[in-house]
Amino acid sequence: MQPGSPDHEWREDCGPRRVLELFSSKWTSMILHVLETRLGGCARTGVLQRSLPGISKKMLTQTLRDMEAAGLIDRRVFGTVPPAVEYSLTPLGRRFVEPITLLYDWARTNADALDEMVGKSR
């Protein structure tokens, strides 16, 4: 494959595929967005769960683990009883917030088209 060729552009480790893999769970983008726009970049687990209606504790925990492993968030455990855990955006995580915000703003602006699309699929 030659750099710049269509085959090279869509190889398995290309940027678009990696970002889609990262955001294959809807919760990853939602957690990043909520952390930045509503919670000042940092929150405890319970606050995050209350800020994301519909997410189960198990899904939140798994998504946070995946995000920490990817370097999007930091996890800090406090020595209290019971232990308190706080999650904060890393500089890398903050870099992902801008495109997520653009996408969410687009979705709000085009809600009618999205509603129509959902109506046609039923």
Image (cartoon, rainbow, N blue to C red):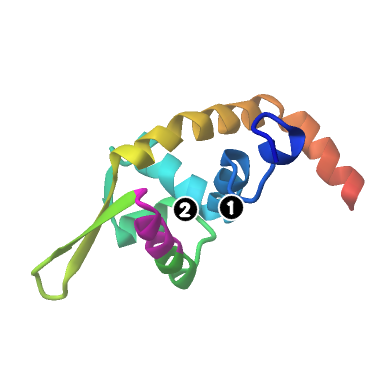
Q: Nearer the viewer, mark 2 or mark 1?
A: 1
Q: Residue furthest left?
A: 79
Query: Which mark, residue 76?
Result: none
- Vertical order, 48 against 6 (above or below): below
Residue at the spot of label 1: 21
Q: Residues within 10 Å of mark 1 (few under 14, many from 20)?
A: few
- Residue tagged by mark 2? 52
Please give the name of the residue rendered at 84% of the width and 40% of the height, measured from the top-left corner: 117
Q: Earlier in the sequence, mark 2 or mark 1?
A: 1
Label 2 neighbourhood size at 10 Å, few (<14), some (14-19), many (20+)? some
Under circle 1, the secondary element is: helix
Residue 43 screen position, x and y as percent = 27, 51
The one of 29 and 115 positioned closer to us in this rendering: 29
> Main SS of the magenta segment?
helix
Report the magenta residues as a range: 63-72
Is label 2 in contact with label 1 (beta carbons under 8 Å)?
A: no
Check the picture and name the quadrant holding the N terminus.
top right
Alpha carbons under labels 2 and 1: distance apart:
21 Å
Q: Position of residue 21 (x, y in %)?
A: 58, 52
| x 44%, y 36%: residue | 96
Nearer-the-camera pick, 92 or 122: 92
**Which amino acid, mark 1?**
Glu
What residue type is disc 2 on? Leu
**Horizontal arrangement in the rendering, residue 47 relative to residue 111 (left or right):** left
Give SS at disc 2: loop
Q: Is residue 79 above or below residue 40?
A: below
The magenta stretch spans residue 70 = yes
Asked if residue 121 is positioned above or below residue 1 in the image, the reply reads below
